[in-house]
Amino acid sequence: MIVLGQLGEYYYSNGHLKAKGLNFQIKKPLGFEQNEADRPNIVQKWEKNKTNNDEYIAFMIIVKKLDSEMRGISKSEWTQFLKNDGGVDAIASGFGNAVNKNFLVIDNYPAAIFDASQEMTRLNFTVRLYFSQIMVIVEDYSFLMQLQSAKKSNIEKNKRLFYQLANSVIFSDQYK
């Protein structure tokens, strides 16, 4: 029997091409199906209720290299920017409907969290996706965790699990 919100063993990114050299580990959410993603920056995704749009929920890990002008900025400078200088608002500004914007620390690295939604069109279908996103700045990388669903209520129901997953993240290279 699987209990809702339960975490399993660790997933390790070491050597995964889409992780672009960023080594991290995160506990797997039990009751979700783990898949390789089709898009180039999505390292892993975990999905539940894939055949029921009303109950569908996905959790994704996305890794991107920061633009060259953003590389080489110290952790303390990123912390200052995100925590005190409007950086969280700047990051969320791409989504005009972003709410619940806050500064976080994930395994010693500065991060921003916000909730938003956006319309996406595939073929001739348009759907509004709701999501909660955490963006962590790790050296020269942007590490994004995203919880998404076509129903806002599914995001709220899984927010505790999202925080548990975020708290399980380890960026192992900092401990060498």
Image (cartoon, rainbow, N blue to C red):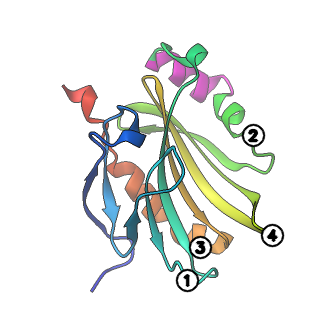
Q: Nearer the viewer, mark 3 or mark 2?
A: 2
| Residue 112, magenta (yes or no) | no
Q: Are marks 1 and 2 in contact (CB under 8 Å)?
A: no
Say if residue 91 shows up in the picture: yes
Q: Nearer the viewer, residue 69 or 40?
A: 40
Inter-mark Cα distance, 2 to 4: 24 Å
Amino acid residing under circle 1: Thr
Q: Which mark is residue 51?
A: 1
Residue occupying image coordinates x 60% and y 14%: 69
* Residue 154 marker: 3
Task: Work out whether mark 3 precedes mark 1 in sequence or the reverse, and give the earlier one.
Answer: 1
N-terminal of the pair, mark 3 or mark 4, is 4
Separation of residues labelled 1 and 4 (CA atoms) = 19 Å
Q: Amino acid type of disc 3?
A: Asn
Alpha-carbon neighbours of circle 1 within 10 Å: few (<14), some, or many (≥20)? Answer: few
Q: Nearer the viewer, mark 3 or mark 4?
A: 4
Which mark sits nearer the N-terminus, 2 or 4? Answer: 2
Instruction: Check the image and report above or below for 91 versus 35.
Output: above
Q: Can you tell which mark lies on residue 94?
A: 2
Image mark for residue 29: none
Looking at the image, residue 32 lies above or below residue 112: below
Q: Nearer the viewer, mark 1 or mark 2?
A: 1
Q: Amino acid at mark 2?
A: Gly
